[in-house]
Amino acid sequence: MEDYENPILLVKDYHQDSDILAWTLKEAGYQVHTAHNTREALNAVTQRRFELAVIDYHLPWSNGLELMTISHIIWQRTPIVLLSLNRPEMCSLAAQHGSCFWLHKPFDPARLLLTVHAATHPSVAA
């Protein structure tokens, strides 16, 4: 288990889903800060540094792509994993907006952990 200096920002609007994702990440040794909408996420990123952001595409008040664009202005080198339904165009949209990883829903916890690990360890392939 690794000890990260900075937590992961998890942005997911459905509390039950975010609780499951946060629990999965915490069980793997990550610190997790959860936001349930873009306003909470933007408030969090102005207060602290994050190792990684895991952002759902569908969010209240804006979408994950808009949040990713703003996030890259605030923390340019923080990797982002975008969560979305399996739509072919989403992968290229995510890359255009700065996502280094795209994870289609539904996904299993092992794939989430593999993707998060690869995003926080750039020399390791996913």
Image (cartoon, rainbow, N blue to C red):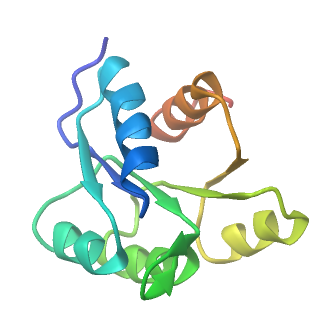
Quadrant where the image shows the C terminus? top right
Q: Residue furthest right?
A: 88
Horizontal side of residue 122 vs 13, given as left or right: right
Q: Residue furthest front?
A: 16
User: Which residue corresponds to the image point at 40% horizontal and 61% vertical from the top-left?
Assistant: 77
Quadrant where the image shows the N terminus? top left
Residue 114 appears at what percent x and percent y? 59, 27
User: Which residue corresponds to the image point at 42% horizontal and 88% vertical from the top-left?
Assistant: 61
User: Which residue corresponds to the image point at 77% horizontal and 68% vertical from the top-left?
Assistant: 90
Q: Nearer the viewer, residue 76 or 63?
A: 63
Above or below, comparing residue 18 to residue 113 in the picture: below
Horizontal side of residue 123 vs 76, given as left or right: right
Horizontal side of residue 74 vs 61, given as left or right: left
Residue 16 appears at what percent x and percent y? 40, 46
Residue 8 appears at what percent x and percent y? 31, 45
Q: Residue furthest top?
A: 1
Horizontal side of residue 49 vs 74, given as left or right: left
Q: Residue furthest left?
A: 47
User: Which residue corresponds to the image point at 38% horizontal and 74% vertical from the top-left?
Assistant: 71
Quarter of the view holding residue 72: bottom left
Quarter of the view holding residue 67: bottom left
Above or below, comparing residue 1 to residue 106 in the picture: above
Residue 28 appears at what percent x and percent y? 37, 19
Q: Nearer the viewer, residue 29 or 50?
A: 29
